Each structure stands twice: as C-alpha cells, then as structure tokens.
Amino acid sequence: MKILIVGNGGREHALAWKLAQSPRAEKIYVAPGNAGCAEVAECVDLNLNNLQSVVRWARDNNIDLVVPGPEAVLCDGLVDLCRDSNIKVFGPAKNAAELERSKVFAKNLMRHHGIPTADYAVFEQFEAAENYLASREDGPLVVKADGLAAGKGVMVCKNHAEALEALKLCMIDEAFGQAGTKVVVEEMLVGEEVSVLAITDGKTIAPLASAQDHKPVFDDDQGPNTGGMGAYSPAPLMTDKLLDTVIEKILVPTVHAMNSEGRRFRGILYAGLMITGGGPRVLEYNVRFGDPETQPILARLDTDLVDLLEATADGKLSEIDLKWKDEAAVCVVMASGGYPGKYEKGKEITGLEKASARKGVTVFHAGTVPKKDKVLTAGGRVLGVTALGKDIPTAIESAYAAVKDIEFEGAHYRTDIGQKALKRLKK
Ligand code: AMP
Ligand code: GLY
C-alpha cells in the first residue's frame, strides 16, 4: 500500500515511523515532512494551502491511503477532496471537523446533547460581552476565540478585568483575525486535565491508550501555553472506571450527536477533559491525533497501524483488535530558545545518533530540516524525545538521559514531564 501522510510535526514523524513498521506499507510519503520523516519515508514538498494540488499529486502517484495530520487541512476539506477523487482517506470530513474548528459549534452541540462541559455564553458584539460581565459577580472566566488560533485563542482569566482585556484582544484588536470576532465566555473549571483519544468509524468507538499532555512552557505548569511540551502514556489518572464514564457520558454521545446532525465522524476524536469534583467535563474537542500525545501512544501500540487506519476509513473498525504494549512511554519536547514566543531557526542539532541508540528511545522530529549531512532546527518545537520503559519512572529516566545527549543553541525543555503521573502513583 502507498501512503501519503500530510503534515510536518512530531505527530507526523510518529505516524510515519509506526506505519513504516507495517509489512503492508510498500511506500510512505510525507508532505512536507521534516528531517526525521525523511529517515523512514520520502518527503514531498507539496503546498498545503493548495489542497487540490495535494490530491492531484496523490492521484498521479497512485496513493492508496491519505493520512492528514493537522487540523487545518481537515477543516479545509482535504478528506472531502480525497473522497471526491476516490482516494481512501483517514479522518473526518469538513462538516465533522467543525467540532474542532468552531468552539461555538462544539459548545452548542454539547449543550443540545447533554454532554458535560463548562457553562458558557456566546458573543458577537463586544458591548454585549461587556454587559454580560457587568451583570455577573466578579470571578474567574475563560475567554475563547471561536476559530482556529494555533492554540493561542484561549485565555484563562482570573477576574473580569482580565476577561475584559481578553475580549478586547479578540473582538476589537482582532489579534486572532476572523477567529476572534465571535467568542465563547465560559465558567472556569478546576481539576486535573487529561486527554482521551478515541478512534471511530462513526459506528464503533475504540479509546486509544490514555495520555497526558503538558501545555505550559515551564516546569510546574508555569508560563504561557504551548502546543505541548511533553506527554506520557498511560496516564494513571485515567482509571478504567473513569474511562468507562468518559465513554458513556462523552465519547458515545458525541459520536451519536454528530451522526444525528448529519456529520458522521470518522477518524480520531480527541476530547480534552478537566476531571472536576463533579466528574469529567469537555474543555475542547480535537479531530485529529494530538501532538505530542501521539508520540507516546504510538510507541505503545502493537496493532498494525495500516490495518487500523484503513479499517476505520472503510467503516470496519469493529474487525480490529487494539493491542498495547504493557510498557509506559514518555515524550519530552525540546524547543527552540524563546518558544512559544519568537525564536531563531537554523541551529545545528548534535547528538541525535547517540540519543537514538539508547534502548527503547526514539527521537521524533518536529521542526527540523536536513541540510547536507546535518540536521538544523526549523520550528518552535524541535524534537520529541520518546522512551519506552517497563514503567513511568524507567521511561522518564531513559527519555531524559537521551535529552542530555542532544544539543542545539538555545534548546529548552521541561524537566518534570511525567512527575504528575508519579505523584498519582504514590497516592
Ligand atoms: P482549549 O483549547 O479549549 O483546550 O483550551 C486550552 C487550555 O485552556 C486547556 O488545556 C485548559 O488548560 C485551559 N482551559 C480551557 N477551558 C477551560 C475552562 N473552562 N476552565 C479552566 N481551564 C480551561
Ligand atoms: N497537544 C495538544 C494538541 O495536540 O492539541
């Protein structure tokens, strides 16, 4: 089978790495990919702003399965275009990707179908939002730009004064462009966050191994949010009992709700949850593999990924048995100096071979480019150093040993990835 993965992050390298292990994968392409993808697949320089040309390339090159990575191409309708050209594709159609593209759509869906989430109001006029704040007792609130804002459109505000600033940023300064002209103002939830990723063909829903992300840039969850600075799997917070509740109250009703609205969901349904005293609540949905959660999740997957993605695309997920390694995996993200703010690119990365030679370690590339025989930095998140181990402490130790082998100017990373899991295991 010839497979085209679309995207250039750590998630896409992990997908390419895992798909390449399948005896059914005859040839894998990644568009545009990165230096790590180039080790396990062929990178092709396609323009993701022109999806028609991506699909044309796939047709001309007899691609059997397209695997889109990031949300943008799903929201722009890559799946629909592939289907129109009779190319098999793994992921939700544009009308189902709306679940991630629009926070207002997602919140309204949850409200109409009784899926637990924070209480909220939607505003299209700044004055109306301002009046709403004035009519309520002061307290913490969360302001969310409606559209895709590269993970930056959510502002957790301690009080109304901060919420007003956030509303100004979205609605008057238009800091997130069109995405922020509509906003959700919602109740702040308190608890611990965990992600649940499930794979579904719209009929069968199978949760993937649990994982926990680390969004803030610094240790102890300090500093601004990033795309994710590391992840581990399994997440001890996600007990079998809690997972049963999440399946019953969130995953199944979400897939049913989408079906009932004529937006059949196929692909990865990712629920970002807050585990509150009153049970799990949905913070957000994503319609794709998480990055970096995918790196430790796929490191633990034993099932053939080609079989899994193809069966889902064909509506035959019920025929697949998901199997996981009984080991833990930890992924530590190494980022460019300054990330998630401004950063420089083009720094030489050394020590990759030494790190990768360690037992159980795979260095997934995100923002990297090959240059002659060197690898240079090319993005904010640069590498996802991922280690498998018999348990979380062992995986943490191996991942950090490998991180210490690697150097590039300005490199920074969190030193506490996985510590939350350890604390919970000690309880
Ligand atoms: P989202 O993109 O909606 O997941 O929001 C990004 C981050 O903002 C989440 O991972 C949470 O840390 C935080 N967040 C979002 N909504 C809420 C909420 N209602 N209460 C508390 N924190 C939130
Ligand atoms: N790591 C969070 C995300 O993929 O959205």
Image (cartoon, rainbow, N blue to C red):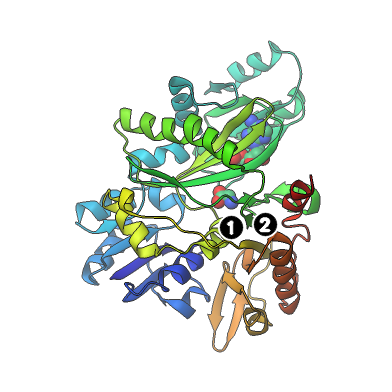
Q: Is residue 165 left or right of residue 29?
A: right
Foreground residue among 390 and 219? 390
Q: In this view of the protein, can residue 217 be seen by the observer?
A: yes
| Residue 234 drawn above or below residue 18 | above
SS assignment at label 2: loop
Residue 427 image offset from top left, x and y in percent = 79, 44
Classify 59 as above or below 179.
below
x and y percent of residue 248 in the render? 48, 31
Rendering coords of residue 290 (x, y %)? 53, 52
Q: Residue furthest bottom?
A: 373
Horizontal arrangement in the rendering, residue 332 relative to residue 94 (left or right): right
Observer-nearest of 398 and 335: 398
Does the rendering let one see residue 380?
Answer: no
Q: Which part of the image, by quadrant, shows the N terminus?
A: bottom left
- The residue singled out by tag 2 in the image is 229
Q: Are marks 1 and 2 in contact (CB under 8 Å)?
A: yes
Q: Is residue 206 above or below residue 118?
A: below
- Which quarter of the frame holds ligand 1? top right
Q: Amino acid at mark 2?
A: Met
Point 23% across, 59% down: residue: 87
Residue lying furthest top: 135
Quarter of image, res 347: bottom right
Per the image, the residue denoted by label 1 is 292
- Per the image, label 1 sits on a secondary structure element best described as loop
Identified by mark 1, the residue type is Pro
Q: Residue at x 67, y 49 (%)?
A: 215
User: Going by the image, does 34 lie left or right of 404?
Assistant: left
